[in-house]
Amino acid sequence: MIVLFTDFGVRDPYVGQVKARLAEHAPAQLVVDLLHEVPDFNPHAGAHLLAAFAPGFPPGSVFLAVVDPGVGTPRDAVVALAGGRWFVGPDNGLLSVLAARHADTRLWRITWQPEGLSATFHGRDLFALIAADIARGEFPTHKLNPIDKLNVEFDAGDLGRVIYIDHYGNAWTGVRGVLQDARVSAAGEAFKHSESFGFVGKGEGFWFNNSVGLLELAVNRGSAAAAFGLKVGDPVRVQRLN
């Protein structure tokens, strides 16, 4: 299985071009579109989202992860094996949170470049080819060098900020495993806890631990982003009482 995680969006041709390359080089592999709306140019937010999503996929899955504002510059390209899953992408912090959270992590620098490598589309021309090799079970040893650590490493602890806003207007944060008696505030508002949407009134705001274990701010049958002016990067304060 190859899992796509990008900031490419779905309006443009980029996802289709990547899938065409994968179909050429790994035709027997299932390709799953996990997320193509990672906040644009934001590997920090992407790193926390990727770390939260990855455990929901079977061991052996290959994640093609591309949030790469430095594409074409001297930034490195890497492969990580963490938690029994493979990750291919830029060395800009995007893979660093999940790498740090697993004791079994192994890392490689991609040293190979294909002919015709576009300066602006390494997702298609480089990362997709490496991901296809791994997914086929043909680990490309001759294209990689083992390394001890990544060049760019984000703090692997919780991130008390909004990292994603879904189409409902729910604001995801990088904070994990919050107990229900915690005090949560953002945008000058205090949010009460609820297990789910239907336990609060229509239009009422609340916080909950979402299906991948991240604290999320929401409004029942409404948009938390619109109601409270929330946007990616906004701080979220969590006071844990226990």
Image (tube, grey):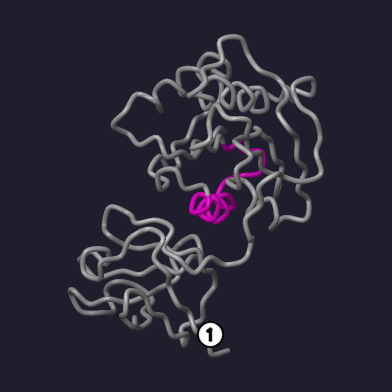
Q: Is residue 9 above or below residue 17?
A: below
Return the residue nearer the eye: 229 or 218.
229
Going 54% across and 72% down the picture, which residue do you hit? 177
Residue type, label 1: Arg
Farthest residue toward the left?
A: 202
Q: Is residue 129 magenta?
A: no
Magenta segment: 44-63
Q: Does the magenta stretch include residue 55?
A: yes
Q: Tell whether 117 sits left or right of 162.
A: right
Dominant secondary structure of the residues highlighted in magenta in the image? helix
Q: Tell whether 242 sits left or right of 9.
A: right
Q: Quadrant of residue 109?
A: top right
Going 35% across and 83% down the picture, which residue do you hit? 192
Q: Tell whether 235 sits left or right of 168.
A: right
Q: Quadrant of residue 143?
A: top right
Return the residue nearer the eye: 34 or 231.
231
Q: Where is residue 13 in the image (x, y as percent from the top left)?
A: 34, 24
Going 34% across and 56% down the picture, which residue do you hit? 165
Q: Tell whether 23 sits left or right of 61.
A: left
Q: Position of residue 74 (x, y in %)?
A: 63, 30
Q: Where is residue 185 in the image (x, y as percent from the top left)?
A: 38, 79
Residue assigned mark 1: 240
Q: Assess disc 1: are there few (<14), some (14-19) or many (≥20) residues with their C-alpha within 10 Å of its C-alpha.
A: few
Going 27% across and 67% down the picture, which residue do you hit? 224
Give the position of the C terminus as an image quadrant: bottom right
Counting every numbered tag in the picture gives 1
Give the position of the N terminus as an image quadrant: top right
Q: Where is residue 195 in the image (x, y as percent from the top left)?
A: 38, 76
Farthest residue toward the top?
A: 115
